[in-house]
Amino acid sequence: GEDVEQSLFLSVREGDSSVINCTYTDSSSTYLYWYKQEPGAGLQLLTYIFSNMDMKQDQRLTVLLNKKDKHLSLRIADTQTGDSAIYFCAEKDYGQNFVFGPGTRLSVLP
Amino acid sequence: DGGITQSPKYLFRKEGQNVTLSCEQNLNHDAMYWYRQDPGQGLRLIYYSQIVNDFQKGDIAEGYSVSREKKESFPLTVTSAQKNPTAFYLCASRHGGNGFTEAFFGQGTRLTVV
């Protein structure tokens, strides 16, 4: 079945850039997503990218997609303490269900 | 305001008891989902429903049951057959179709077996 993988932890200093990486297996995915989860809460959509795009930028967020390698990354510029959260990569499978990665816990150090 | 509401936020269950987690949405979404979240394991799909009166098992359906009698509601029952039910449960919904869709999540229910 489809699988989405991410590293589990990332620590950065406030003001630095954060890069969260993700690999996926379903080459037919048309959309790939990044969700953010704050402690004790549900997930919120942060950004997404259509599969025929290589890059999408939205303010401090940059999403890069390498379809050949099935690799997705999320770059957060000028990382702030409020960015500390768990970030989930997700794809939509052939059955139109979302498949989530294990989540990357981002810690922002002062 | 449209949204998806889960209740209760915290739930305690004695061993051997069934409990039901509520999920209601007023987004007019066709599809609804239940996920279980454990530390370091991400979200695992328990059940999903693409349309009223129909639902399908996800990856970890054993010990759980659902119903979808109304479009707005998708309750999850954690039965006594679920051996390790302590977890954070998330409900989500999305509108139908093959184009871009976003999954909207509730705030979650933390279930603890005591």
Image (cartoon, rainbow, N blue to C red):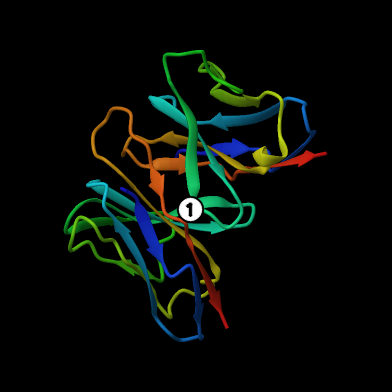
Query: Is B74 situated left or right of B108 in this image?
Result: left
Q: Nearer the viewer, residue B38 or A41?
A: A41
Query: Is A76 situated left or right of B111 in this image?
Result: right
Number of other residues with Cα within 10 Å of mark 1, as a class: few under 14, some 14 to 19, many 20 or more = many
Q: Quadrant of the N terminus of chain A?
A: top left
Please report the residue visible at 51 percent of the width from the left and 13 percent of the height from the top.
Answer: A54
Q: Disc 1 marks which residue?
A: B44
Please report the residue visible at 53 percent of the width from the left and 54 percent of the height from the top.
Answer: A41
* Vertical comparison of A49 with B19: above or below: above
Give the percent coordinates (x, y) of residue A100.
50, 42
Give the percent coordinates (x, y) of residue B25.
29, 54
Residue A76 in which image quadrant: top right
Residue B87 in which image quadrant: bottom right
Look at label 1 and name its amino acid: Arg
Please report the residue visible at 20 percent of the width from the left and 55 percent of the height from the top.
Answer: B71
Numbered circles on residues, count: 1
Describe the element under mark 1 as helix, strand or loop.
strand
Outermost residue toward the front in this view? B1
Residue A63 in which image quadrant: top right
Give the percent coordinates (x, y) of residue B112.
55, 75
Query: Is B40 situated left or right of A44 in this image?
Result: right
Please report the residue visible at 60 percent of the width from the left and 43 percent of the height from the top.
Answer: A103
Give the percent coordinates (x, y) of residue A90.
48, 36
Q: Quadrant of the C terminus of chain A?
A: top right
Q: Nearer the viewer, residue A97 or A38?
A: A38
Q: Nearer the viewer, residue A35 or B55?
A: A35
> What chain does mark 1 sit on?
B
